[in-house]
Amino acid sequence: MNEIFQEAADIAYYFHWTKADIMAMTGKERGIWLEQIQRIHSRQKHQRDAETASQLNLFMENKQKDIL
């Protein structure tokens, strides 16, 4: 029973759907939406990692210019 509440909490947090809407879903439907949340997270993490790498490269290039 705890699992359904965890699923409902995650879905409600990310999509702002009501408890009634989420509880009306089948387990399979909740699973699909949880997969979408994971997909969103993965894409955002990839974007953040790429931005961090780009900023780090720019920083290192500027540091090398300062040294020379």
Image (cartoon, grey):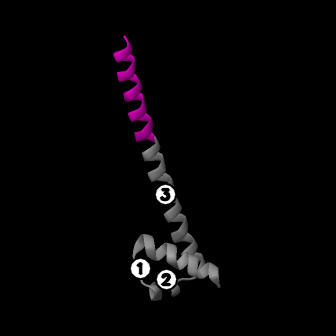
Circles 1 and 2, Cβ within 8 Å, touching? The answer is yes
Residue at (42%, 32%) from the top-left corner? 56
Closer to the chain start, of discs 1 and 2, is 1
- Apparent side of residue 17 relative to residue 32 in the rendered image (left or right): left
Residue 1 percent coordinates (x, y): 65, 85
Any mark on residue 17, and which? 1
Pointer 3 residue: 41
Residue 27 drawn above or below residue 34: below
State whether the magenta stretch is mostly helix, strand or loop. Answer: helix
Q: CA distance from mark 2 to mark 3?
A: 20 Å
Residue 63 position within the rendered picture, expressed as x and y whole percent measured from the top left = 38, 21
Question: What residue is rendered at 43% in x and 39% in y?
Answer: 52
Q: Is residue 47 above or below residue 4?
A: above
- Please, what is the three-letter code of the amino acid marked with disc 2? Ile
Q: Secondary structure at mark 3?
A: helix
Query: Mark 1: which amino acid?
Result: Trp
| Amino acid at the residue labelled 3 | His
* Magenta run includes residue 64: yes
Image side of residue 45 versus residue 65, left or right: right
Q: Is residue 59 above or below residue 29?
A: above
- For the record, the magenta segment spans 50-68
**Mark earlier in primary sequence (2, 3):** 2
The residue positioned 38% from the left and 28% from the top of the image is: 59
**Looking at the rendered structure, which numbered label has been put on residue 7?**
none
Query: Which residue does the image show at 40% across and 34% down from the upper left?
Result: 54
Q: Name the residue carrying label 2.
A: 22
